Image (cartoon, coloured by chain):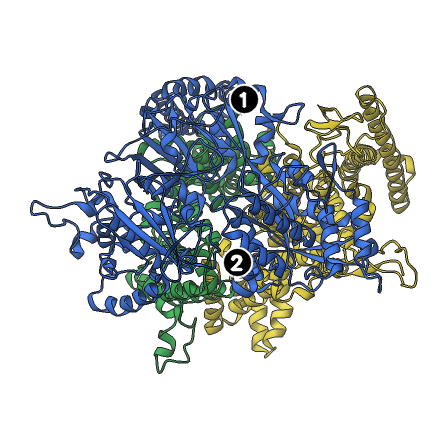
Amino acid sequence: MTVQPVILWTDALVFLLVALAVLFAWMARGREHLRAPWRYVARSRVGMASLVVLAVYMAIGLLDSLHYHPLLPKAGDNGHGPRHSAEIVSLFDAIVAPLRERSEKTYSAPLAWRLYAKESIERPDGTVYRDYPRLKYGGAHLKEPAREWGPDIRRRMALGLVKAAVIWAVVAASLALLLARRDGIPLSVMFGRLARGETAIPWRTVLATLGLVLAATLVVIELAAGYHVLGTDKVGEDVLYQALKSIRTGLVIGTLTTLVMLPAAILLGIMAGYFRGWVDDVIQYLYTTLSSVPGVLLIAAAILMLQVYMNNHQGAFNSLTERADLRLLFLCIILGITSWTSLCRYLRGEALKLREVDYVQAAVNFGVGHFTIIGRHILPNVLHIVLITVVLDFSGLVLAEAVLSYVNIGVDPSMNSWGNMINSARLEMARDPIVWWSLAAAMIFMFVLVLCANLFADVVRDAFDPRLRNSRD
Amino acid sequence: MMAYIIRRVLYAIPILIGVNILTFVLFFVINSPDDMARMHLGVKRVTPEAIESWKREHGYDKPLLYNDRAAGAARFTDTIFFQKSLKLFQFDFGLSDSGRDIGYDISQRMWPSLAIAVPVLFIGLLVNISYALLIAFFRATYIDFWSVVLLVMMMSISSLFYIIGGQYLVSKVLHLVPISGYDTGLAAIKFLILPVIIGVVGGIGAGTRWYRTLFLEEINKDYVRTARAKGLSERLVLFRHVLKNALIPILTGVVVVLPLLFMGSLITESFFGIPGLGSYTIDAINRQDFAIVRAMVFLGSVLYILGLILTDISYTLVDPRVRLS
Amino acid sequence: MRKAYRSPIRRLVAPMALVLVMLLTAGCLSKPWNNPYPARDSDKNILYSSFEERPKHLDPVRSYSSNEYAFIAQIYEPPFQYDFLRRPYRLAPLSATRLPKVTYYDAKGKPVDAEAASGDITMAVYEIEIRPGIHYQPHPAFAKDENGAFLYHDLSTEEIEAANRLADFPRTGTRELVAADFVYQIKRLAFPHLHSPIRGLMADYIIGFDAYGKRLQKVFDTHKGKNGTGWLDLRQYPLEGVEAIGRYRFRIRLKQKYPQFAYWLAMPFFAPMPWEADRFYAQPGMAEHNITLDWYPVGTGPFMLTENNPNLRMVLSRNPNFHGESYPEQGDPGDAEAGLLRDAGKPMPFIDKAIYSLEKESIPYWNKFLQGYYDSSGISSDSFDQAVQFSAQGEAQLTDAMRKKGIKLLTAVSTSISYMGFNMRDPVIGGLSESARLLRQAISIAVDYEEYISIFANGRGVPAQGPIPPGIFGYRPPPRGVNHYVYEVVNGKPHRKPIEEARRLLAKAGYPGGRKADTGEPLILYFDVTASGPDDKARLNWVRKQFARLGIQLVLRTTDYNRFQEKMRKGTAQIFWWGWNADYPDPENFFFLLYGPNGKVAHGGENAANYANPEFDRLFERMKNMRNSPERQKVIDEMMEIVRRDAPWVWGMFPKAFSLHHAWYHNVKPNLMANNTLKYRRVDPQLRKQKRLAWNPPVLWPIGLLLALLMVSAIPAVVTWRRRERSAAR
């Protein structure tokens, strides 16, 4: 056995979420009323384009959710079996190992071959002069960096573009082939349709987005082999690596927060609306009380509570990753608690309405059990509200993470997250020459994710909320 | 109407008690009275007996929720919780753990918070509604399309970026306003310009989009179609019918946040060094000053409930069809 | 009808115009626009500074941190002060007429020589004579009516209800300083109710101090019930070891020889306190209205606190009753050349007012300094590149841009240490066993503090070779003073030993390659740390990297401040960061951090590493009471060798204080012991005003560009509008 897999709490929940999504898709296959809105999404150009980008983010997030203890290199003496490191890394870490391991001494600008600040360098004869030291890894292959740097960058970019073009062509061709076979038309006709954008699902947009994503990815890969594409931070860590690692944190906060709050929100919301009377009173009391406590205080208190817990059970958390992960989960739960009340209120209102609908009344009169009615008649009819809330909340939560990190009640300071990156970059803004790349990297990565999520959420809402869909003519 | 309000106010009491218990429990799970004493006595050369006497003086030497050494009702009343909560309901916040009068501090710090929050709310409202009307007027043209793209992009930018970027550009590079700080009276204006602009700009994305949806929903209603069919100009339709009818959700949306304006904005106030209630709360959390935290939570809850009641009342005022029962 | 509906664009015009008008009024009234202070103050003789955190205590009995001293040291005057210019640090009289006269007595009450063995000395008597004619600042506590009765000592409840600030009591008075006020303050130090941080320490030395505190507590508990005021007239209860002799002289008697006591007499703890103030503030209801001694100090110093709004600013103004003091006429060599003696003999203070603004974030602080709105600045690590560069010789100097602005740089190694400690009670890393000692030595080599200083402090620090910083007696410069367990001397300079050496030590300790020799399990160590700031992540990554070089896995246990303190008290931490800021310039104040009986876990003392080595403790007790002499140096050398070998700390670094100040700011010399330095400062307001104007020209074209862009983007809208209107009209 070479590795020892570890399933962190958030990993487990991420997998649960994926399983739920697959299950939902499988269920939806057979039901026209569930398929129709998704078909609407699939035919929207904006929706599909943002889905492509989101898929890339999700792929990275999922790869980053497969954790294990790596094997330690064999120690000098014999007699012991293989030992695993206490450190936890993810599959994604293994894939981008060079990014993780090649750390410099301190700041270097994007694609630089030397440090950002001058340092005293000692010559072999003992005299000292000040200059920009060469980087250990970035541009280390260049013999005469001042002359070779430009051509080398251009060569790598060109190579990346060519590779991207090849891969893109293969993907496009196989897609066309597949579609042509499905529709039973000649390949050339299919190409024509694709190029003119005449397919029902906007494949042309998908391919165009994919082309852009591929080009960007491959150029970055080519460059990253020899440089720090987004520079390095104060202790010389690669900023690109940090930004990529932050993707998982952002996704986890955006999705798990709603996931952990869903059961409570759905159950209580529907129960309040359906049973009314004292149940309604109790549940209303509960959520009014919770929502009147300022969220920041609740979050701060919960985070501190967790720290107390972890200090009292130090043995259980041997690695930083586990501690950080638990804090992340806790943050999700507590954010969930502060945000479930609005969904609960919506669901209560909807359940109140649905309760009066004929077929529900009929079912009540026939003596069907309450929970059967809820499960069969009410729940399916409010699911679209749940879905809309989930997608709409996502981007807000990703943004909230950054703000919470500023108040020091966000994710663990040792965890990679955009919030932490922005928070530390704040101080770098005062440097001169200004160190802008950490801030820029975090902002751009976050912006792209949130933008795509917002666009996608719009499409989903239009698809599932027929009232709005009709009004958009 | 009066009866309704009284009932709502009475209904608020159990909620406030619940909030109080929640804050109390949360705070003392993380923070023992010993910790608080150490925090206030400083780090260097603190003796255990100094801690004991600090706790005695500040009333933290009693049990938290249940006193098993007392008898009868005193089992519940002779506790930190009861002693510290009772006064809260009379809006007597008492002294902070560092010995300042909380009520006085709140009354002083309320104004800077309002000085930012009120202009942000109203200028923001004006800008957002105007822009949304503009978009509604040009709906289904490329202006609409690009505006929505712009709005979504503005929504997707972190609020921290607006603040950091704004401060860097306007104050540091352009030298237009002081970077941070505050002053009393009219002199405060130059400190307020930047945070207010940033607050308004940061809110355009989400705000305008929300109003645009409202207006478009209204535009597609039958009476608007009828009005248009009657030959009314687009402008008249928009202003006379659409805006007027959309005012209800706008108004109620504003009313619910009105009382909370007192609470200030945590991030903006910290960044700009404005001595408002937001930074007061954050500082108290960091300094673990329980008395202030509890007072602010209590105040926040009261204001929140007030907002809900005001919303209900404003519904009836705007739309006579709604009856309060 | 049509008029009623204005176009949306026109609706936008009004608020925009309003903002513009606001901008213009704010602007035209005063240039530069970004001046955070009122324009009318530009010409005034005011010093501008900042504070980061609200000072918790301004009562000299309790105040014990540098941010509080920044204020109260200007207000309260203890008997002694540190000489401003001369080094090494030495005491000078302040409210006293001369340095204290100390006499030692043996058990029979006979005076003995100061050099007698400390065991023979059973009493040390300090006699202090104060200057006549010193008066307190104007304060309502002294205000009297025509009959000579105090105006504000027996206020009614209504009168107190109406007040929220001290200024709400308009009449003031003053009184001459007398020796009894010093005695009164020392009694306050003993009063348990006031929680003085040095009460425990003083109880070990001042005769009768401990018993006095207990007695007061008892009296207070019964007394308080009787009349409801919190005031206890301490004048009625004599303290055995402290007494006033006549109007201008007082005497303190100690149980044993304690040469460092004179340094304590230079701290605000021993500043005089008039009983009238205590009486005034103790009236019931005052504390509820924020009127306490903790908020409104009463002193004899050059300044008094005239505005106390910790949410915004604190203002110190010149004390009209100040007794007068002239700028020192003697300095160290080089001071005259540096212009530090230009004001010699002139009466102090030079400035009329000092305004301290609340500034929590470092970026605004730094930028305001650059714009000329603060007169001086410490440099945060991140602003450093902008301000300072190193010359080829490795000396710090200002960048050209800074020099062009006329900014000056001062550096000084501070009398503090920041180190990485090992918990000596820990089974793995602690203890005096050979294996643990080697492990600690290996780590000491691996944790490269030179790199730490260059990355996180931008070179502003000196790697420590032991607990004694330069400038304190007992420090030895390299090559003599090099810690040979961690460094080797090359060309007379210390060079950190190579990592291979650390690996060798680690293997010898029983962990070859960072794995336990017997089981092959990886060695896991724990680093306990409070993580709060944004910079912490980088720091922690760095620490982990250092341990990884030895193959040791370091687990970071981050907690909040309270939990961390608790861990330190319980001794459950393993490796931690800690620091110490000297109270006074004496090696005792550093070595006591390693003295066994000061162990944090066992005795609640300041020995955070819980280090206890009997031999070291024995030497410490000897060194403590010695005069600075070659013999003392010898003992210190021995102690140094012991702790270097045991390595209870990775010695860490002595931070270097870098401060910048503008050309208009004069009489600055780093003095790390003195806090009352405001009176020496002089500013040139005219130069400041001129520079501020030159440095802050408002740049307006981007605003114009923005407006133009808005207008351009409005064109297509207008076009569409026109077309619609036309088609509707048709």
Q: Mark 2 lies on which chain?
A: C
Q: Chain A is drawn in which colour?
A: yellow
Disc 1 element: helix
User: Residue C106, image x and y in percent?
Assistant: 40, 59
Task: State the residue at coordinates (58%, 58%).
Answer: C617
- Is residue C153 left or right of A4 when viewed as pictured? left
User: Residue C726, image x and y in percent?
Assistant: 50, 22
- Is residue B199 left or right of C149 when viewed as pictured? right
Task: State the residue at coordinates (10%, 46%).
Answer: C145
Whole-Å distance between the Cαs marked 1 and 2? 41 Å
Q: Which mark is residue C315?
A: none
Which residue occupies the foreground of this view, C495 or A37? C495
Q: Chain B is drawn in which colour?
A: green
In the picture, which chain is blue? C
Q: Classify C687 as above or below C415.
A: above
Tell me which amino acid carries mark 2.
Asn
The residue singled out by tag 1 in the image is C402
User: Residue A203, image x and y in percent?
Assistant: 79, 40
Q: Mark 1 lies on which chain?
A: C
The residue singled out by tag 2 in the image is C562
Task: State the residue at coordinates (57%, 39%).
Answer: C470
